[in-house]
Amino acid sequence: KRPAGAPDRAIAKPVTKVGVIGAGLMASQFALLFVRRLRVPVVITDLDQSRVDKGVASIHREIEQLRAKGRISGDEANRLTALVTGTTDRAHFADCDWVIEAVFEELEVKQEVFAQIEKYLSPTAVLATNTSSLSVEQIGAKLEHPERLVGFHFFNPVAVMPLIEVVRTPLTDDATLSTAMVTAAALRKNAVITKDTPGFVVNRILAKVLGEAMHAVDTGTPFAVVDGSVQPFGLPMTPFELLELVGLKVGAHVLDTHHAAFPDRFFDSPNLHALAELGHIFERDSKGAIKGYDKKAVAIV
Ligand code: 3HC
C-alpha cells in the first residue's frame, strides 16, 4: 500500500524523449545519465551553436571513455552517441515529454527560458529544473502551466552521487510529481521529495558547512586548520575541494541565496565571489593541498 502522501506511480507519464536546456557542466552530466539509463533520444540546446557543440562533444567523449573502460560495448557506445543531439532550434523540443533545464542560476534567466520553451512543447510535457537553491515556484512564475513544473536537483558528479531532490511546489500536480519519482528511479537514483524552501534540504546543510568554512578563512583561520578540523567527520572532500568541484561561482551563489533568505543564520563570502568572478580556484601547495586564496584575486582580502 502506498504510504500517505507518496505519489501514485501509476499516473506517471512515459518519458520517450528528453530535452535538456543548457549544455554546461551539470547539464552534460545528467544528459549522459538520461541517455544511458532511459535509452531515449536526448536533445540539448543552449544560447548558441558553439555552446551546444561543446556540450554534445563532452557527452560523446564521456561515452567513449565508458567504452574504453569496458563499461559499455562498442555497439552500445554507438547507440548512445547517436541518441544525443544538439540544436539551437527549439522546435526540436516539440515531441519531448521531459524537459529539464540547468542554465545560469539567475531567477529571471530561468523564468525566461521556461516561458520561451513552453510555446514549443506538447501540452503533456513535464518541466524540471535543476536549480540548486532558487525557488522552483518562482522559476515557474511565467509559465502558462506551472502545475507541470518540478525541481529535479542532481549532485556533482552526477554519475556517482546517488541522490536526487525532487522539489514539489504548492502548484506541482500529482502526475508531474509521480513522473519525477519514476524517472529518478529509472535513472537508478534515490529520490527524496522536498519542500520548495531555499536550498531544499541538502544545500541548506551544505551551505552551513561551506559558509562556516569560508567565514573561518575569511576571518583569519588558516585553510589547513579548517581542513584538519573537519577531518574527524570523514568527508570525502574538504569544504574547499567541494567548492572547487561544484564551481566557485555556483558555491558563491548558494551562499548568497542562503544569506539573503536567512541573514542571521548563513554567511556569504565576498572573497569567494572575488575568486569566482576572476575565474580562479584556490591556491595549492606542492603536494596539491589547498593552502589559501589565489593571491592574484585577493586585492579585497
Ligand atoms: N564523473 C564521473 N565519475 C566520476 C567522477 C566524475 N566527475 N569523479 C569520480 N568518478 C567516479 C570514478 O570513475 C570512480 O568510479 P569507479 O569506482 O566505478 O571507477 C568513482 O567515482 C570513485 O572515484 P575515485 O576513486 O577517482 O575518487 P574518490 O573515491 O576520491 O571519489 C568523489 C571521488 C566521488 C567525487 C568523492 O570525492 C565524493 O563523493 N566527493 C563529494 C562529492 C559531493 O559531495 N558532491 C555534492 C556536491 S553539492 C552539489 O552538487 C549540489 C549543487 O547544487 C551545489
Image (cartoon, rainbow, N blue to C red):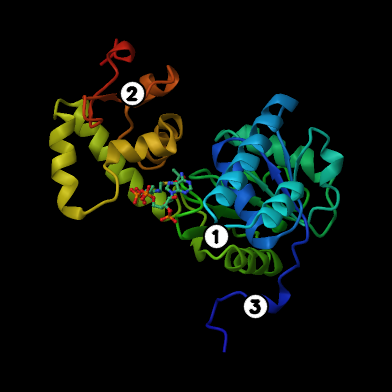
- The answer to the question of whether label 2 and label 3 lie on touching residues, with beta carbons closer than 8 A, is no
Q: Identity of the amino acid at label 2?
A: Pro
How many marks on residues? 3
Q: Identity of the amino acid at label 3?
A: Asp
Q: Residue furthest bottom?
A: 1
Work out whether mark 2 precedes mark 3 in sequence or the reverse, and give the earlier one: 3
The residue under label 3 is: 8
Pointer 1: residues within 10 angstroms few (<14), some, or many (20+)? many
Q: From the viewer's perspective, is 78 left or right of 58?
A: right
The residue under label 2 is: 270
Pointer 2: residues within 10 angstroms few (<14), some, or many (20+)? some
Identify the residue at image location x=55%, y=35%: 105
Q: Quadrant of residue 246?
A: top left
Q: Can the viewer see residue 265?
A: no
Image coords of residue 253 (percent x, y): 44, 33
Image coords of residue 148 (percent x, y): 71, 57
Q: From the viewer's perspective, is 63 left or right of 272?
A: right
Q: Does the residue labelled 3 lie within 8 Å of ligand 1?
A: no
Identify the residue at image location x=68%, y=37%: 56
Q: Viewer-proximal residue, 235 or 148?
A: 235
Image coords of residue 94 (percent x, y): 86, 48
- The answer to the question of whether label 1 and label 2 lie on touching residues, with beta carbons closer than 8 A, is no
